[in-house]
Image (tube, grey):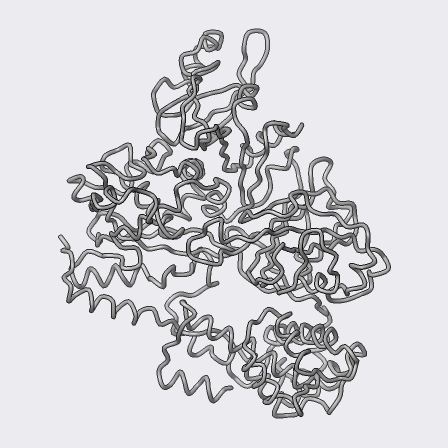
Amino acid sequence: MPRTRTDSESLVFSQARQQQSVMMPIPGVFQNIFQGRKMQGKFGSLENPRKFKDQDFDYLREYCQRQRILFEDETFPAHISSIGPSLLSEDKLRSLKWKRPSEIHRDPQLLVEGASRFDIVQGDIGDCWVLAALGALTTQRRFLENVLPGNQGFTQSYSGIFHFRFWQFGEWVDVVVDDRLPFLNGKYLSVQPRSCNEFWPSLLEKAYAKLRGSYQNLHWGFMSEALVDFTGGVQMQFGLKNPSPFLQDIILAAIRSKSLMGCSTLKGQEFSNVEMENGLVKGHAYTVTGTEQVPYKNGWINLIRVWNPWGKGEWNGPWSDKSGEWKYVDSDLRRKINVLREDGEFWISCKDFLQQFAQINICNLTPTFLDFEKQQKPWSGFLYINPWLKGSIGEGSCIFDTFFKNPQCLVTVKGSDLPSNGHNVVVTLMQKPSGHSMSNKDRLPIGLMLYKVDSEFQSLKGTLPQSFFSQTTTTTELKQGLSESREITSTFFLDPGNYIIVPYRKHHDQESDLKLRVFQKGAELPGDGSRKLTSMNMPKTVPKTYQDDSYEDIFARYANQSSELEVSQLQRLLNEVVLNDQSIIVEGGGFSLDACRGILLLMDISVNGRLNLEEFRHLWKRLNICKNLFREYDGNRSGLLDFSGLRDSVQRAGFSVSKEMLNLMALRYGDHGRLNFPNFVCCMIRLQTVIKVFQNLTKDGQGVYLSKEEWLQIIMSS
């Protein structure tokens, strides 16, 4: 049996963690360094999730096995700091004990006959919102297996370490924890397993607490957030006070499409969980686990099955376990669906459900639950990520000179996209937490605006100008307006045409990150640089505003017989095609051979001194971004960007650099501080590349550890 490590071993262990945390960089000219990475595939995908706190589960477990020690997580220690300062009184915090499963039961298991909602019994922490979402997760194995990886447990490879995966702001993260669980007065502080030797609920909850910053940050929250974190899907909330006339159709469609569902009751005057006479709990989250249409007397009645994360405490009104209504139901059907046991699960009529519950949450990879008819065109999802720009519009403001600089997402609705009922476009906007606590106080009021693009502006390419927003009066503010929620969702039935979606927020003097997702009925991948959401993998990308689909023809005209571009051919292409664009003013000469050699080196993924079609496609995207930026900030049409133009274009592109760095860029690439278009292209491509290199070399944003060889490769290629 592995032992707990000593203090001296802890120092060695910490050093080992630092060594394994040094990751190799990224594509382009740095591909040779990047190949040193252990994992392959899209970073942030399920196959290659981001390592939360820079902890690699396989490496750490193997290290513990070699040293014959049990893992102790220094980033989420068995200490009151992991509990949080306000969850318990000081005397209770001092009384906490941390126990491993082997100290709790002689035969601990991660799973006993699979994972089920009935394995979960909520403890004293008010995290019913998490457990209700977790209960829903267990009903759909395709989602559960993403969060709960296999190949771990209390078998021969046991080393006191476990890991779980969650979706965060467009990417999957892998969270490592040790198996020391908090106990107070001999009882689980939080969730406890119904089976005394089954520990997956407690360990998964601990991993989620680590992701959120502490156990305290699980005490009260929003089921909508947990549903998205467990699936990476789109979530919608439906109020039941004045329910949609389509609500019953939506619930049936959700069941049919195997969506996750939860619901909650109204809060009372008291903030604690108070059980009412009918058996329901005020301000409590539940899981919706099924529906059934039951023949009753001379008709039919619609029932909804609901589960309480307490593992007990059930509705005692009509259609509860022992209610008289069941006497009128066929005995075979009654025995099949009406299980008489105290497990927290119960049936309730649809009518009583609407009266007793305040809202229902539904989540799936795409909004298939809005499809009322069985045969529908599939939904396509597109993901956009961009930083907020300072100066974005505030609530009730008409600052069109700043609003047009916000990210703009183009949506084209075709006649074939229109469903017979329901909606054809769903938009969600999520803000990335600014700190580690993920608390509501760190969130900014955010909103979305939808504009119909009239024929007057149809021919414009790139972002719509300031004049569009000052002239266009047919704007539609999305339904919620400004909200401090982590994510807002709106649905639309849009007529054929072009629309743009523009996010905004109240505090225009702050910067933050946003994620905009657009789900569209029957749409194809847009040509604006966004990525299509496929399966559970939602890659992060920064959208560009314009793309010329003729790049393949241009490449074919200039490429050599091997279908590749050498530096001289690239120079001819850039000077004869790119600089011939009448929308930009070119001053001070074209692309020099040395400049083209530098560009090629940065875009050359295979590091062979030539560009193939795929590599040229990436370069073509960047060239079009640079054209849009240069055209926008060359205000006097001089063909040169001054310092302020360079600053604004860098900010508009989503890069945050210091004034000192901007001065250095102007000095390196400018003539008397002013940049012509070829030099601007060289500057921006290099800036984006080196930033991407740094982001992939470091996980904490603080420092990069390089070998001499790696340092030389980066410097000499720059």
Residue 8 left/right relative to 61 = left
Task: Please state the horizontal and vertical placement of residue 281, each as a whole percent of the image.
Answer: 43, 26
Q: Is residue 154 above or below residue 674?
A: above
Residue closest to the eye, 86 or 668 = 86
x and y percent of residue 711 in the render?
Answer: 41, 84
| Foreground of the two, 247 or 108 | 247
- Nearer to the camera, 49 or 257: 49
Name which residue lies at 43% across and 40% down: 220
Q: Position of residue 39 (x, y in %)?
A: 39, 65
Name which residue lies at 32% across and 35% down. 124
**In the depicted structure, whether residue 290 falls above or below residue 236:** above
Q: Residue furthest right?
A: 456
* Of the pair 114 and 445, the residue shown nearer to us: 445
Residue drawn where x is 63% and y is 55% of the image = 505
Whether residue 333 appears in this view of the structure is no
Residue 175 % position (x, y): 36, 55
Work out whether 407 lies above or below 296.
Answer: below
- What residue lies at 65% left-to-right and 81% top-to-bottom? 681
On the image, which quarter does residue 234 sit in? top right
